[in-house]
Amino acid sequence: MAATLDVAPGLRGLPRGLPYHQPVDRKAFPDGLRTSGQHPPVESQLRPFEAFPAEITGPTVWEGKDVTARPDEWTHRWTEGELKELLQAVDAFTISGIPLVNINKQNFHIPNVTRTLQAARHEILNGRGFVLFRGLPVDAWGRQKAAVAMMGISAHLGYLLSQNKLGQVLGHVTNLDADYKNSLDKVKIAATNAAQLHHTDEADIVGLLFCAPGESGGLSGCASAHTVWNALVKERPDVAKLLASPVWYVDRKGEVTAGQEPWIKVPVFYLEPGGQERVYVKWDPYFVKSLTRYSDKGLIPALSPAQLEAMAVLEETCVRHGFEYACDVGDAQFVSCCQTFHSRTAFVDALPPKPPRHLLRTWVGTPEHEGGWCLPFHDSFHPKRGGIQPAARHVHQQVHDEAPVGEQRSVSLHQTHLGQLLSFMQTTP
């Protein structure tokens, strides 16, 4: 019997002409119905540059200088009552013995905080594209409880996604002294102390909880992809057109399902195939620059001079229209990867006995039938769309996976084991 997704009628963004009880295309999910992973877009749903708007308006369009002047509009400091409720939920979940990968909004009960998170989710998906929560007492609670809180908060925003081929759903962003300059095809820039240019992650929302800030640097940055698009169309329409064309090869960096090519071919800017027809972005320059091992062999085209120029123009435009801000221990930022670029400046780690810079990262999927963006991909309706498809040998745990936003589904989805946390996660203050 074919696996199916039950989707209730009347929800925004339903595909035209399809039944609500819709078979899942297993070709899109070769390892089964888990985190769907990376794959090329549906070519028939890609739109030419001429179909894109010449100017985008609305709350997703903003300038960094204006956002900097109004921090109260995008930051929320946890209240004493909210922190009490979060801690009670953390303790109750821990006592339950439920594996952390099984956390969801049903077993992480925060009724009052939920109202705050619902408003934040709307702002992330439909507004500026980012929210900063301040004041989670990481040092007082300890890293273990902070990790549970971060996972629980993220689960109320959507579905937790695998972040690597091991299937880990809680990532650690810290400097591992990896040599990215000579091994860009094997190293992820987040595992270094180097600057990260403006990019998006393989998720709908990325969450980052600051557990240790480091000695200096490491500023977070954001830029509105819609403001950037407007500037490109006005100033460099040739660059905008190139970025909207499916001529960009993106490296999978070895995180490949059997039978798949080690790269995918995509545009940088997309147009929603239905619904609101918003401009969507998917971009990481480090995953584009790392493909010389294939282009040198003639397997794919090398980056053209026009593409290299477009990459430089895109980054310069993000810097010009974005902004940077400092985060403290206990700050948690959630950024949309649909209409918002994010970045990080280079940083210097503190010397022992001070801890190195350390962030906890979550990736969250928000399928279109639950208020997420309509995407030109096979998995737009998949609850756990995006992420990194884990290797089959790492998948061994069945997870009770109720929909965190709205609908019940008839699919029993798999998720992967969290893996061992870093040793300092075991420490308490």
Image (cartoon, rainbow, N blue to C red):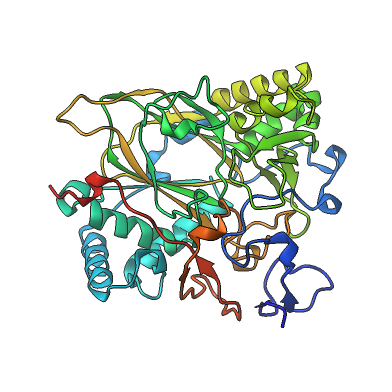
Question: Which of the 4 image quadrants contains residue 255?
Answer: top right
Where's residue 15, x and y in %? Answer: 77, 67
- Residue drawn where x is 61% and y is 63% of the image: 367
- Residue drawn where x is 49% and y is 75% of the image: 402
Q: Is residue 232 left or right of residue 189?
A: right
Question: Which of the 4 image quadrants contains residue 329?
Answer: top left
**Closest to the observer, 40 or 79:** 40
Where's residue 93, x and y in %? Answer: 28, 70
**Closest to the observer, 29 or 223:** 29
Where's residue 223, x and y in %? Answer: 55, 34
**Closest to the observer, 96 or 46:** 96
- Residue drawn where x is 62% and y is 28% of the image: 290
Count of residue discs: 0
In the image, residue 4 sits, relative to residue 391, either above or below, namely below
Question: Which of the 4 image quadrants contains residue 22?
Answer: bottom right
- Residue drawn where x is 66% and y is 77% of the image: 7
